[in-house]
Amino acid sequence: MTESEADAAAVPASVGDTAASAPSGLSRRGLLGLAIGGGVAGLAIGTGAGLAGGVALGRARESADAQSAFDFFGAHQAGITTPVQDHLHFAAFDMMPRSDRDDLKSLLQDWTYAASRMTQGLEVSATGAVGGPAEQPPEDTGEALGLPAAGLTITFGFGPGLFENADGDRYGIAAQRPATLEKLPPFLGDDLDPELSNGDLCIQACADDPQVAVHAIRNLSRIAFGRARLRWSQLGFGKTSRTTSAQATPRNLFGFKDGTANILADDAAALEDHVWVAESDEPAWMAGGSYLVARKIAMLIETWDRVRLAEQHSIIGRDKGAGAPLSGGGEFTAPDFSGTAIDANSHVRLAHPEQNDGIRILRRGYNYVDGNNNLGRLDAGLFFLSYQRDPSQFVSLQRRLSTDVLNEYIRHVGSGIWAVPAGAKPGSYVGAELFD
Amino acid sequence: MTESEADAAAVPASVGDTAASAPSGLSRRGLLGLAIGGGVAGLAIGTGAGLAGGVALGRARESADAQSAFDFFGAHQAGITTPVQDHLHFAAFDMMPRSDRDDLKSLLQDWTYAASRMTQGLEVSATGAVGGPAEQPPEDTGEALGLPAAGLTITFGFGPGLFENADGDRYGIAAQRPATLEKLPPFLGDDLDPELSNGDLCIQACADDPQVAVHAIRNLSRIAFGRARLRWSQLGFGKTSRTTSAQATPRNLFGFKDGTANILADDAAALEDHVWVAESDEPAWMAGGSYLVARKIAMLIETWDRVRLAEQHSIIGRDKGAGAPLSGGGEFTAPDFSGTAIDANSHVRLAHPEQNDGIRILRRGYNYVDGNNNLGRLDAGLFFLSYQRDPSQFVSLQRRLSTDVLNEYIRHVGSGIWAVPAGAKPGSYVGAELFD
């Protein structure tokens, strides 16, 4: 990441104005060039144009990394159909108890500004880690200085608690709450830890370099200071699903290929049917968005590792080597459920669209290892992420999996659901439609 | 990773013989082709030759990945001067309470066999994840199937507790204990968690793909079943030091370049003086080895992020952007401590060889993020790893850092020291000299 004077000049002059009011020296509300307080939409659009220019400038300067930089602005948020990157840092946030509507709006604006820069390989602000006054703390934490964009995508979501909580309609958006956005129902085998579940807001940062993903979450957490607080977070690696046909199907920690039948980015019809919220869906502000479900699924890998190969095959319903369905063929041959080759309670049968009224979801999970427990067993598993047009798709599939023999080897320990709005328009911010 | 019949044929016929005695189906003691029980050195060397042939065969088959595969056998263990890879999975093990000398020897032999294969992009054994009998659990856990060697190195170390513990000289090696191999003394600012410290054995697995490093530790843990148990483990990323001049100096989570003055792999004189145990050093079995110190150093990053840039510079003694010493020049200009530009208690001054009677160490640390705490702060820091000819080098440097102003922003929460023997000779196993 580098900064030039040209880029610095593209940043609104008002940045400095609000620095004094930012507790840790960051000019937060000023980052988008907005005056403190909301409702100045005209100003937002005006300075937004400048912002977009600055970002474009930044990318042009880093042409060597152009291939690994994805647009932040667009019809949909990046990080959903984007080719799955190698690393994940996922974070859930809670709004601070006394925060108000303006806090939420300004936070989304500041996050948008920072995300639009970081995804282009730039620092979190124009002065960044080393370009600001020596007598102030740097605006960027600096550990990504010199690193390219590394395919970074930053995807924002709104949890049910944001719309209405114990404090009531704190942000004036209760009426905008999607009817289906509610805490997921309990499922058989749930062993959920509240400290690994839910959150008013979420950020999914994916990149091909973990330092870039961590830098993004760290700086966005910092920007949230006083308005929202990190509730829980999760690092992941070795993507366990693919979103383009050019990507090889990766393996999960049970050693099986995972995501063979995933919805791919070039399947426009499937995306329209199963992933993107349509214009005709309710509520209108979610058009072009999606719903994100996260499940932290601990795998009892030491137990699994003692299962006979034949039984592993039977449990999954696929061959471990090639990933072919047990009914025959290759990895991409459609499973044939008419015979007995694929067990009635195998994972592939229960999860397959053909056995679920055609329900499909777009999966984007990662493996995780969080050290080990006192018994010397790795604390490892799958951090499952899926995007769907309606939360009921996940709920229906997960209920169907209640008889999955695989359940003996997994525990769902974390859970969350978020409404992921459409992409931010250039000059605007993510979720702006929610406040219109 | 792939298996061919030719490779399977290179594995000693005795593998099958001991499969029945292996609790989870792994033919452990048979992996090296040794009869159960120790002391059959002739046999070990004889079958070892077959093993080396099998490994060579494997590598030839995977020429596409040759560039990222490092020899396991050699004068020194790989993973010390090897160009620092992007990812780390470090694990400390304790021997099981009732284990004996033969258990320890057979474990080191089995680990050697498995490591010599995995570092070449092969599965843990010839039958691996899918090549064995369907009625047995697979010998390899399978999640690295299809992945290249990814620069994997696996480095083994022996902790003080291996030589003598509450049970006495259980392994008959107390007399071989290096005089300087003892638990590190307490240092100012230590806040050590016993569950993140020490261990009879350690394994450092480094790779450019975290899934490959995790696969290695997982499978080596599995092979240890009944003989040693995982005590603690740590994942790391974004290497914070370099070992070749071709590598750019990476940044730690304080945003500063780290490792500018590190010992590099091509500096033979410095390695001889500061890293490798010499033939003339005691004990003789450690010749060609080194001593590894691990320190898990939590960084109070939210506190650090509120420090003025000028003060950050002063604390480190270097410029945050270029990494140049505050006395002037560029990153690689030698710091000039004669003036007042570099603070007396700055990190660079206290740690510099010029201020420490010329003492140098080879650092190989990684950044880590283990989620966050209840206050919404990232649980993050530096997993410090250093190699030195004698533990006293680290002890001396760490004592010197007692007045380091940086201490206000860090906490040492984990610690360990291990004797890292020379590389295994082809046909032998790592640490064999300890038992001769």
Image: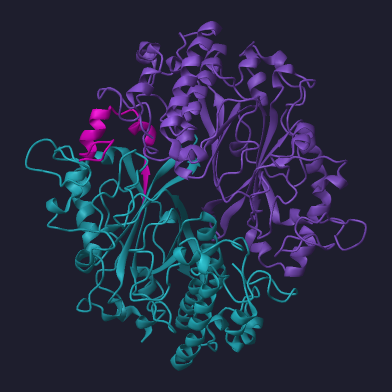
Chain colours: A purple, B cyan
The stretch drawn in magenta includes residue A201: no
The quarter holding residue B196 reads bottom left
The quarter holding residue B146 reads bottom right
Q: Nearer the viewer, residue A54 or A126?
A: A54
**Can you say whether B368 is above or below B264 in the image?**
above
Q: In the orientation shown, which residue stands out farthest toward the right?
A: A338
Q: Nearer the viewer, residue A49 or A180?
A: A49
Q: Is residue B38 left or right of residue A101?
A: left
Q: Which residues are magenta?
A: B295-324
**Can you say whether A212 is above or below B278 in the image?**
above
Q: Would residue B254 be visible to someone looking at this image?
A: yes
Q: Would residue B39 be visible to someone looking at this image?
A: no
| x, y percent for residue B368 | 43, 47
The quarter holding residue A137 reads top left
| x, y percent for residue A211 | 44, 42
Quarter of the image with the N terminus of chain A is top left
Quarter of the image with the C terminus of chain A is top right
Q: Is residue A199 left or right of residue A333?
A: left
- For the image, the number of numbered tags is 0
| x, y percent for residue B48 | 48, 85
The stretch drawn in magenta includes residue B320: yes
| x, y percent for residue B181 | 29, 68
Q: Nearer the viewer, residue B428 or A324?
A: A324
**Can you say whether B328 is above or below A12 in the image?**
below
Q: Nearer the viewer, residue A360 or B36?
A: A360
Residue at image x 61%, y 88%? B13
Residue at image x 61%, y 42%? A83
Q: Is residue A407 left or right of residue B203?
A: right
